[in-house]
Amino acid sequence: MDNLLQHIPQDLYNFLLVALFSMLIGLEQRLHHDSERPKSLLGTDRTFTFIGILGYILYLLDPVRMLFFGLGGLSITVFLAIFYISKIWKEKQSGLTSIIVALITYSLAPLVYTQPHWLVLLILVTILILVEVKEGLIAFSEKIDNREFITLAKFMVVAGVILPLTPDTPIIEGLSLTPYKFWLAVVAVSSISYISYLLRKFVFTDAGLLLTGILGGAYSSTATTFTLARKGGQSSFPPAKTTASIILATAMMYLRILLLAFLFNRDLALKLLAPLLVLAVASIGVGLLMFRFTKEEQVKTVVPQDEQRNPLEFRTALIFAFLFVFFVTLTYYVLQYYGDKGLKVLSYIVGVTDIDPFLINLFQRKQTVLLSVAALATLQATISNNVLKLIYSLILGSSAMRKYLIFGFGLIIALSFFLLIFV
């Protein structure tokens, strides 16, 4: 295939790409118009192919100054403007999608000549998808209230404006806490949780127990365990499948920790890669085993939308910020007075809270904590957090869940202690 392509002239190869991409866009327009049946039709496969070829010819005549290409684009824009005015006059509709797509099709030739082909293909795929999912985008936008946009805008300011401008100098002499590390920790954790939150709220709105555990675990395994255990206390919720969802949330916790480790400390992440993956796979296996081989009816909707708070909300970020600063200070003094042994003991204690602030602080201490000690403390923190989730579930869940909970968490905790030997 490579030898065949080498013998095809570059201009012919680019022409075929432009013609093919233009035809694909036109075919998508035909499908789109067949479903909507508009009164005024700009064109479909042949029209858009001709538009792409016209752009190719005019670009090739003067590829440096692009004079002919510019004049051709201006002429097409005039014709499209006349069509648009006529459409508004006749149909009282003001949609610009087909006109914008036609102008992009006309611009394919210079894109093919000047840009990598993967970028042109990405543009093509994006056009095809956006044209096809029009109704879905409208339905999606109707679900989003003004608060979601405001919160997202605030996050973009924090991540894209404030973070790059934040100084990376210690606030207090001796502490490793800097404004940059602080904001980076908030942005990293909030981003992971926010993706899970959006998927849960807008994509998988009717998620069953299985997806609830997976998406909720990426958001917060402790919060998801608390919610599912409380739901499991109701007689209508199957005990084995509810427990399976809780175990799957714990599996996502390990993958979440591994991702954070790669973001902040690659060397430590490589050391934790094997044990965390083993624990994640084992947790997934246990969860799916309970979910698949128990004769219980699955409940479709589990977690109401208002039970997962937006991780970008001010109160949520404030709690994380307080815990992060607290653990930075506490870890510093523990290491100062008690050394590595004190850190190992502390890692068991922090499991009763959100372990992310402690772990991110630990991951950022590249110069002050040995890799082996940091890896050991990370696994120990997950053990104590799992013990806490087990206690939560036993108290809040139904009596029928207890045997599944003890089996699932018992196996994971035992495996975690075993893996401590190899860290």
Image: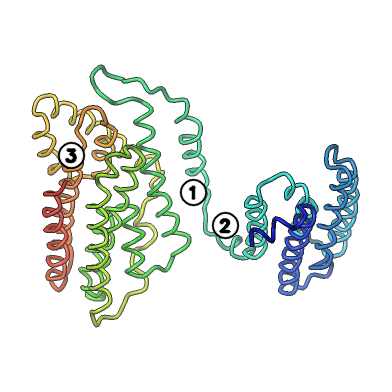
Q: Residue at x 77, y 54 (%)?
A: 9
SS for callout 2: helix
Distance, label 1 to label 3, CA atoms, is: 42 Å
Where does label 2 land, which residue?
Answer: 141
Quadrant for the N terminus, please. Answer: bottom right
Q: Looking at the image, can residue 20 be seen?
A: yes
Of the two numbered discs 3 and 2 on the same chain, state the one appearing first in sequence.
2
Q: Residues within 10 Å of mark 2 (few under 14, many from 20)?
A: few
Distance, label 3 to label 2, CA atoms, is: 48 Å
Q: Residues within 10 Å of mark 3 (few under 14, many from 20)?
A: some
Q: Is residue 284 above or below residue 356?
A: below
Q: Are marks 3 and 2 in contact (CB under 8 Å)?
A: no
Q: Residue at x 85, y 37 (%)?
A: 65
| Residue 71 in the figure: left or right of residue 281 | right
Q: Amino acid at mark 2?
A: Ser
In percent of width and height, residue 121 lies at 65, 56
Label number found at residue 325: none
Count of labels in the image? 3
Looking at the image, the residue that sits furthest to the bottom is 295
Image-quadrant location for residue 233: bottom left
SS for callout 1: helix
Looking at the image, the residue that sits furthest to the top is 173
Q: Nearer the viewer, mark 3 or mark 2?
A: 3
| Residue 143 in the figure: left or right of residue 27 | left
Where does label 1 land, which residue?
Answer: 148
Q: Amino acid at mark 1?
A: Glu
In percent of width and height, residue 193 lies at 38, 49
Distance, label 1 to label 2, CA atoms, is: 11 Å
Where does label 3 land, which residue?
Answer: 372
Q: Looking at the image, can residue 226 be seen?
A: no
In percent of width and height, residue 7 lies at 73, 57
Q: Nearer the viewer, mark 1 or mark 3?
A: 3
